[in-house]
Image: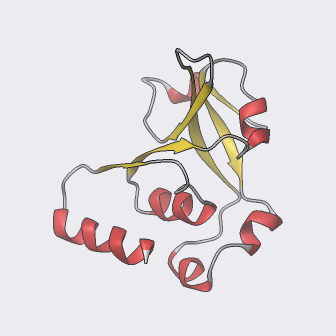
Amino acid sequence: MELRNILNMVNILKNKKIMIIFDRGYISTELLLILSKLDLTFLFRVQNKRYEAEKASMQSNDEFVKFKIHKSRRRRISEEILQHVEYIDEIDIRITKIILDTVEEEYLFSSVPFEDKEKCCMSI
């Protein structure tokens, strides 16, 4: 369903720049693969207790990390998605940590680039 909707949107908007914003609960390895493959700009608000390894690897409140697509994540990817994306081991994801007025931490996962991504990319 998500793949079909995204492909329809890309087809309708053709050569326009697209940024898709997702609320909590939508992020998945499948979606990250699709969006990366289609070279779409995205931003996810990430639920607490998700992707703890990536969050813990951060050295600052805004940086790129390597989102590893290891076996346990790959097993959850549907055959439909695997037909549309080639095998990749990792995706560069920008993680931005925001401290809310309530002192809660909010995390955003995105593909929004820095001016010079190479200076801020690290591996976990």
The x and y percentages for residue 8 are 27, 74
Residue sitting at 59 percent across and 78 percent down?
82
Query: Residue 69 falls in which quadrant of the image?
Result: bottom right
Residue sitting at 76 percent across and 74 percent down?
75
Seen from the viewer's position, the closer of residues 101 and 51 is 101
Query: Does 95 appear above or below 66?
Result: above
The x and y percentages for residue 123 are 75, 36
Residue sitting at 23 percent across and 71 percent down?
11
- In the rendered image, the residue lying farthest to the front is 102
Could you tell me how many numbered marks the image carries? 0
Q: In this rendering, would 115 be left or right of 94?
A: left
Seen from the viewer's position, the closer of residues 53 and 98 is 98
Quarter holding the N terminus? bottom left
Q: In this rendering, would 1 be left or right of 30?
A: left
Residue sitting at 72 percent across and 45 percent down?
51
Q: In this rendering, would 108 be left or right of 43?
A: right
The x and y percentages for residue 47 are 62, 44
Query: Does 74 appear above or below 65?
Result: below
Seen from the viewer's position, the closer of residues 17 and 45 is 45
Q: How is the image coloured?
A: secondary structure
Quarter holding the C terminus? top right
The x and y percentages for residue 49 are 73, 43
